[in-house]
Image: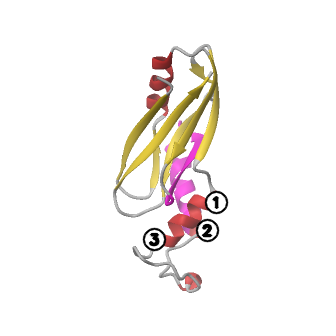
Amino acid sequence: MTLRSLSISTSGQGLYEFTGEAASFLADTDAQEGLLTVFVRHTSCSLIVQENADPSVQRDLKAFFARLVPPSDDPAMRWIIHRDEGPDDMPAHIKAALTQVSIGIPFSRGRLLLGTWQGIYLFEHRDRPHRREVVLHCSS
């Protein structure tokens, strides 16, 4: 199988690592060399490859994005029109636009070619819990 969907449950804004699930999928394909494409099927979260050793990196990234794009009820965000699902709605779309919804990771000998401290993360931009669908595709 060269395609798999993952369901990732979130409990609010933050980073949710799924490197192990991606590596497991790749092992199940028996592919030796190629590209793993990861795609998230939502517009208010994104994907990033980031350090997975020091949790302060995740805290700092979350704090940075909160300062860069505050909730729409912040006075600096009065210009926002789209507020259908609350003050985190449009800011979540902006954060997703600033990051990415698809990433490609090369692999060789059946293993992801991530760096020593790199992990694959779903970056949740909404406050409420969500169930996010991530699609993995192996091209070899």
Three-letter code, disc 2: Leu
Q: Give the Cα separation between the discs numbered 3 and 1.
A: 15 Å
Q: Callout 1: 10 Å neighbours few (<14), some, many (20+)?
A: few
Q: Give the Cα separation between the discs numbered 1 and 2.
A: 10 Å
Q: Which residue is mark 3?
A: 88
The residue under the point 44% across, 76% down is 87
> Closer to the camera, 31 or 122?
31
Query: Disc 1 or 2, which lies upstream in sequence?
Result: 2
Residue 125 on image: x %, y %: 48, 60
Instruction: Please give the range of residues in magenta.
Output: 43-66
Q: Is residue 7 visible?
A: yes
The residue under the point 55% across, 86% down is 78
Instruction: Check if residue 58 falls in the magenta segment.
Output: yes
Q: Of the numbered discs in the image, which one, if any, rests on residue 98?
A: 1
Three-letter code, disc 1: Leu
Image position of 107 (left or right of 73): right
Three-letter code, disc 3: Asp
Q: Which residue is mark 2?
A: 68
The residue under the point 57% across, 55% down is 61
Instruction: Check if residue 16 falls in the magenta segment.
Output: no
Q: Callout 2: 10 Å neighbours few (<14), some, many (20+)?
A: few
Q: Of the numbered discs in the image, which one, if any, rests on residue 40?
A: none
